[in-house]
Structures are given as structure tokens and as C-alpha cells.
Image (cartoon, rainbow, N blue to C red):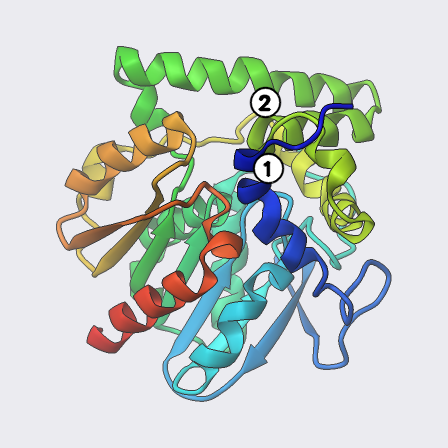
Amino acid sequence: MRKITAFLLLLILPVIVAAQDFKVASVGEKPSQLKNVRVNGVELHYLENGKGVPVIFVHGGLDDYRMWEAQLKPLSENYRVVAYSRRYNYPNNNLNARPDHSALVEAEDLAALIKKLKLKPAHIVGHSYGALTALFLALKHPKMVRTLILSEPPALSLALEKPAGAALVNEFLDNLWKPAALAFNNNEKEKALRLTVKYFAGADVYEQVPQNMRDYWRGNIREWEALTTSSNAFPVLRREKVKRIKIPVLMLSGERSLKVLKFIDEELKPLLPNAERIIVQNATHDMWSEQPDTLKKAVLGFLDKH
């Protein structure tokens, strides 16, 4: 086995450190303060703390509410903070994934959660697929959203409209999405997970992260299977509709993130009439674990203005 290079170690070290903190909420165990509601025929587990204007955190793929641990306490000092797990993520027990599962479905779950907990209007903080979910929420239910904080939503349709972007999307689909879907269809879940970690973090990383990090990913494998095998994982995000989002938007982009995600952010920014963008230095797509303090300051500064 090759050793982790210095660059790769810097890339995954924050993830490894974060993994050490998953003690109170390891697989098979739930923190006592965890709550759950039933909406749209599924259960959603969430953490809630603080008082004031609501701030809702929406995680990305292969993640769950635990990814926001570093953000919850500081923000709850001035806001009502909610971090939930999307429908197929730990520790939800929603069986029989929809064959057309998508960010549209997730947006309706989020809308139902907001209604159930009386969170309207809320600041929505979304990462990756959670950011795509937040975008569709703002389009479908604009009165529920006060502001958006988006970190690299995979709105592939925006890239597909241009040749350079289409080439990046096809690279992503051919080297990750389709092989992972094939592995899942062959009931090779572990293979799909290894392929995914290799694509985002590099070869050998899966073997060298702590066991509880691998357990964390395995705890969210059902969502990854639902997405990669879905017939509609990346719904079309129409430019003319995005232009109607008039609320303040903060975009967070990793300096060293995937090329396709950088391309999408470049396409998305001009469509949002009230958006500002921060390039997070020395950060990849996993920016929330790599640069938690930097992002905390950026989020608090943005929220304080709105």
C-alpha cells in the first residue's frame, strides 16, 4: 500500500480529526437531545438549540446532522439552530428509497420540516447536495427562506449547457457516479463506498482513516445508493428561475475543490442578483471540516447583516 503523500495528508487530516469526535453519536447510538418528526411519510431526526431567528443546516451526501457539530454551539448563542438528517441518512430508518429520489424530494421534506417546527422564514445553510436542496426550496417555497448560504451545489444542468462544463460533468459521471451506481446495482456497497472516497480524497485514503470514519460513511450509505441509482438525481435548475431568487445569498467555494463544482459556481453566481461569494482558501469540497472556524466567521458575519 502506498503511503499518504504530504499533500493528501493535509487534505484528509481535518476529516480524520473530526472523526475522532464522533463518540456521542457513533453508529447505533443517538445523543439524548436528538429529536425526530414525521413528515411526508418519513422520519427526520434533528438537533435543535438556541432561540431567535431560525438557521437550518442541510448536509451533503454521505453525511448527516453530525457534520455541523462545530457550527451549532457558536450560532445557537444568537439564533435558533436546527441541524437535521435528510431522509435516507443516519439515523433515519426510512426504507424503500424512491427510484426518482432527488433534491426536489429533499426540498419538500425540508419545507415540511420548516412548517412542522414553525421555522418560517429561516436562514438555510446547505453543503453540496444539501445546497442543491436549499436552492430548490427557495424556488418552490420562497416565503420559507430568509437567506441562503450555499457551499458548492452540484447543479449539473448549469454546466451541461456549455461544452467545457459538459466535459467536466461527463468526467464526474464516468469516473464516479456511474461506477458507484453499477456497484450498488450489483449489491457491492463497500465497493461503491471505496470508489467514492477514492474519487474525492484519493487512493488508499479509505484504508487509512479511523474505523469510526468508515462507520460514519457506512451509516449514510443508503442515501448514496438512493442518489447514484436514481433516475433524477440532478434535476434541471433553470437559469431563468434562479434569477427570481432575490433574497441575500452567500456562496462558499473551495479554492481546491473539484473543477466541475468550481465551474458550476461560476455559472451560478451571475444568476443570483443579491449574491456574494467567498473563495475559501486552501479548502476542498470538504471545506466545513477543513476550515470550520473560517466558515463560522463567514456565516456569522453574513447572518448579522440579514
Which residue is at 48% across, 76% downward? 81
Q: Is residue 236 left or right of residue 278?
A: right
Q: Residues within 10 Å of mark 2 (few under 14, many from 20)?
A: many
**Quarter of the image where one finds residue 48:** bottom right
According to the picture, the residue beneath numbered tag 1 turns out to be 101
Say which quarter of the image contains residue 254. Answer: top left
Quick one: quadrant of the C terminus?
Answer: bottom left
Tell me if residue 163 can be seen: yes
Location of residue 282 in the rendering, given as x and y in whole percent from the top left corner: 39, 45
Q: Any mark on residue 204, and which?
A: none
Regarding residue 145, the answer to whether it shows in the image is no
Q: Residue at x 44, y 76 (%)?
A: 119
Q: Residue at x 30, y 59 (%)?
A: 142
Residue at the spot 54% in from the left edge and 38% down from the top edge: 102
Mark 1 lies on a secondary structure that is: loop
Looking at the rendered structure, the kind of residue marked 2 is Trp
For badge 1, the amino acid type reads His
Position of 294 with respect to 240 (left or right) is: right
Up/down of 1 relative to 218, above or below: above
Image x and y of residue 294, in percent: 37, 62
- SS at mark 2 in the image: helix
Q: Which residue is mark 2?
A: 177
Residue 16 against residue 178 in the figure, above or below: below
